[in-house]
Amino acid sequence: MKPWALVLSGGGGRGLVYVGVFKALAHLGLTPSFVAGTSIGAILGGLYCAGMSPRELDSFVREEFELRDYLEGITFKLGDGAFFRFLQAQEALNHLSRGKGIDSGKKILETLKKFTKGKRFEDASPPFACNAADLLTGKEVVLDSGPLAEGIRASMSVPGIFTPVSIPPYLLVDGGILNNLPVRIARKRGYQRVIAINCSPVTPVKPEDLPTGISVFFRALAVAGNDRPMDPKWDTPDLEIRIPQKHSEFDFSQKEELIDLGERTILKGESLLRQVLTAWHFPRRPSPKVFEYSP
């Protein structure tokens, strides 16, 4: 099989499907030659390329991962009732009024260092890159050198929630703001076969689908990252696998359901996936082939 690249979109908690994606690809004997991602796609893609097996990713997310454990705010650990939500909002506003984000991201960075084992991008296998948005220039930045944990931390730095990451000469935030499906990273490296997994495709919603401020915030980020000029030569994958969901991007509680959804989606799309990866000649199209699994 010829070399191929896997591209993982951002999408917050929805991106837990990627654990199932990696499990299914391993089951099918399909190993990407290169991985690119943004935000949650950078986290799980980066951990995979740092050496965590699909089984290890699955075990970690199902048995150990709890978002609150990686946040610094005291009130986030207290409870979920109305009173605690009030305290959480007050704490968040205090942080925003005094700093550049609700959470400094230090605990998450230390966790990323632990699970990437201190590796650099240059050590990743398969090779890995992620993107981020530079607040100083307004440009997309591709991260493919230096400490892996630091690059991932920059790519997942949701504005207002996590403080920006300074990697001179840049001040970086979540890459999904400018490009939530960074196919271009793979194309620029010469990959002729690119499979993109989109866990948070932008589709029309109803007003009742945006009941909270956080849902409006994430929807605004998704729209911003989606509505940009697309160059078919660089931005179009050969196959886009869409996994639409109703869960909020900030909901990390449906771990088992999302992992299983990712696994089922890849297994259902196996025939099309193999068709794309084994084709001798796959002409570039203005829009990609799309597989969308609706359970």
Image (cartoon, rainbow, N blue to C red):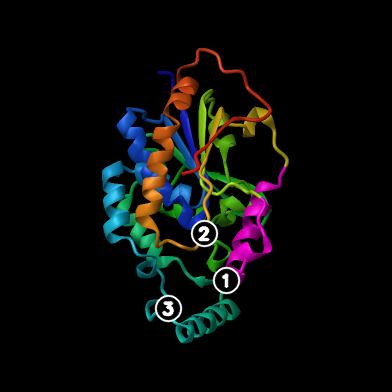
Which residue is identified by label 1?
100
Residue 224 vs 54, above or below: the answer is below
Q: Amino acid at mark 1?
A: Lys
Residue shown at 52% from the left, 29% from the top: 194
Which residue is identified by label 3?
80
Q: Residues within 10 Å of mark 3 (few under 14, many from 20)?
A: few
Q: For residue 172, which quarter of the picture?
A: bottom right
Q: Earlier in the sequence, mark 2 or mark 3?
A: 3
Secondary structure, magenta segment, majority class:
helix
Is 16 or 192 nearer to us in this picture? 16
Is 113 or 177 nearer to us in this picture? 177
Query: Which secondary structure lies at badge 1?
Result: loop
Q: Quadrant of the N terminus?
A: top left
Q: Residues within 10 Å of mark 2 (few under 14, many from 20)?
A: some
Which residue is identified by label 2?
249
Residue shown at 36% from the left, 39% from the top: 22
Outermost residue toward the front in this view: 295
Residue shown at 44% from the left, 24% from the top: 271
Expressed as whole percent of the image width and height from the top left, the position of residue 50 reads 34, 43
Q: For residue 49, which quarter of the picture?
A: top left
Please state if 106 lies on the left or on the right of 221 as rendered: left
Q: Is residue 208 magenta?
A: yes
Label 2 and label 1: CA atoms lie apart by 21 Å
